[in-house]
Image (cartoon, coloured by chain):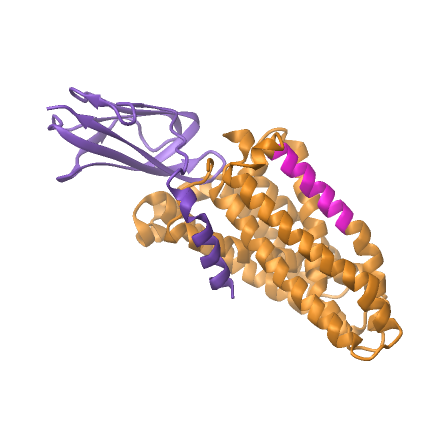
Chain colours: A purple, B orange
Amino acid sequence: MIKQTLLGLAVAMAPMLAAAHSVSKATTPANGATVADVPELSMRFDDPMRIISVTLTSPDGDVEIERETGMDPATEFRATPLEVLAPGSYRLDWRGMASDGHPMQGGFSFTVAG
Amino acid sequence: MTGLAPIDGLAVLAIVAKAIGYGAALLAMGGVLFCFIFAKHAEASVLRLARQLAVGAAVLGLAVLALRFGIRAARISGMGFEGATDPMMLGFVWDSPLGTTAIWRSVGELAILTILVPRIGQWIALAGCLAVAISFAQVGHALGEPRAALAGLLVLHLLTAAFWVGALAPLRRAAFLPMGADLLHHFGNIAAFGVAVLIAAGLALSWMLSGSLAALFGTAYGVALLAKVMIVSALLGVAALNKARLVPALRTQASGAARSLRRSISLEILAVVLILLTTATITSVTTPPVNL
């Protein structure tokens, strides 16, 4: 009974998923931007966010990045790619925890021009 | 639709675990409140059921609390289920408001177990109820501003909800007992005030977290909240039917009255389950409009 109810709830909410909000207010590069190079990746938050996992992916797989911001809650997160990003599309995904204890996740995409 | 976090398998698991945790906490608190309020009106077997429910729910609540720590650790880690046992992730969860909540909740649920001890145990269990209710004000949406008002309203909302939810199963049993009609009638009189407080506190909380009526439409929080209000309305309808028709029928010993009343109370229990699932969804994956 609970399972069915939950399934119903999940199905009802499915259309909303596409528009799920992201709490990162500003990112570098900006979401959807096309840039020549990416010296730094950054995200800003309204409230301190504990960013726990970050992955940068390209169509060829994961790209290694070095975190400048540690795992302590911060309103700004910064990291740098360990290699020069080749032309193509990239996506950064993160997971973490807001100051009220809620698990949070988000991401943004950008393109490096050839 | 704005203000809805992505829902993956772990998020669904988190919602179900949270709903069970809500149910356990309400039953544990409600069982104690029932024993306290109806000590003189309820028969021994009904009071025994309320005590057993309180103890069973408190134990379940403690187990679910531990489980929720693991689920939360897994969700923040990005490692999937592996993160559930990662000491660093569990440490982050412990440092978060959920850690503070866990202390209040576990102390409260342990205190509720003393309901089995005569006399002094009842008072310790009653203090446990308050601790469990306060635990909910230590985490999540209740941490917004004005904090004191949100916390006070939430504690009031939960204690009155617990009074109602915790009474359902004992009342269902009482419907078939000789003195049951009087107990049900007495409950109805107290519940009329309790439910008024429950709804007033709920509306005030919703207003403070929504900011405006317009915010209810077009945000995930608002849509889920409206769904909750609809189920609560149905529940109120059933409760009103019980008070106005079925309990009076039971008092005049009308044939079939006890069975109708038991069926009606079962329906109330189903509505409560749906309300808890909806509430767990609201507090897990939606953002209150005032925070958007």
Residue that appears at 12% across and 28% down: A87
Q: Position of residue A107 (x, y in %)?
A: 31, 34
Horizontal arrangement in the rendering, residue B110 relative to residue B95 (left or right)? right
Q: Position of residue B242 (x, y in %)?
A: 78, 64
Q: Position of residue B224 (x, y in %)?
A: 55, 45
Is residue B120 visible from the viewing direction of this image? no
Horizontal arrangement in the rendering, residue A60 relative to residue B125 (left or right)? left
Answer whether residue A15 is magenta in the image. no
Residue that appears at 72% across and 62% down: B167
| Closer to us: A52 or B221 | B221
Q: Position of residue B125 (x, y in %)?
A: 70, 57
The span picked out in magenta is B195-209
Q: Main secondary structure of the magenta part?
A: helix
Horizontal arrangement in the rendering, residue A55 relative to residue B282 (left or right)? left
Answer whether residue B208 is magenta in the image. yes
Query: What is the residue that sits farthest to the right in this orientation?
Result: B252
Is residue B216 visible from the viewing direction of this image? yes
